[in-house]
Image: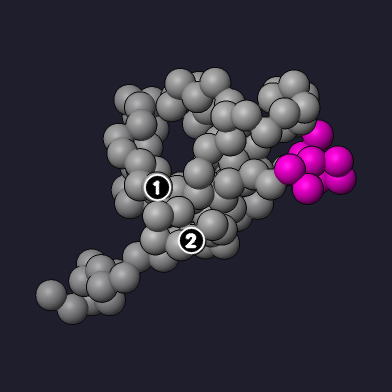
Amino acid sequence: MIHDGLVHGNDIYLTSVDGFVVIVDAEKRRVRRRFDLSAISGARTPLGWCPGIEVLDDFEVVVGFSRLRRTRWEDKVRWVKHRLGGTGAGMLPTRIAAFDLRRERLRWEIDLEPAGMNAIFSIHRVGDASRSGSH
């Protein structure tokens, strides 16, 4: 279940709700690579909704995760209920995380809940001179 995506060069980077980054060759319209962010981060519980992505370069991405809410399990995230055994224990907070896909490792994470944020809808760079053409 794809949630978000953006074009970077000749590729389309997509996130799935269950924590994968999928890279699609835009010209050939074929999946080039799939990355399981849960396996990369070593998480033992679902990462959360994975609704946003920003591509920093060909193999470095920042992904947003919104905390799972128990009220949505029955109709939208049965996979979560199964993995957690039907309990809410171990739910991870709303956060952003940077992944090095080339080395398949988690670089850093920032918990956003202490700042009062409990949902992410997308991720966008701010003040990036390389995108705006200014220096």
Q: Which mark is residue 111?
A: 1
Displayed quadrant of residue 113: bottom left
Identity, as a three-letter code, of the amino acid under mark 1: Asp
Image: magenta residue range: 70-78
Query: What residue appears at the point 69 percent right and 25 percent down from the top-left corner?
Result: 84
Do the residues bearing badges 2 and 1 touch, measured as CB atoms within 8 Å?
A: no
Q: Residues within 10 Å of mark 1 (few under 14, many from 20)?
A: some
Quick one: quadrant of the N terminus? top right
Q: Which mark is residue 60?
A: none
Residue highlighted by disc 2: 117
Tag count? 2
Residue 30 is at least partly visible in this image: no
Q: Secondary structure at mark 1?
A: strand
Q: Is residue 72 magenta?
A: yes
Query: What residue appears at the point 59 percent right and 41 percent down from the top-left corner?
Result: 48
Q: Is residue 131 left or right of residue 74?
A: left
Q: Is residue 58 magenta?
A: no
Marks 2 and 1 sit apart, C-alpha to C-alpha, by 9 Å
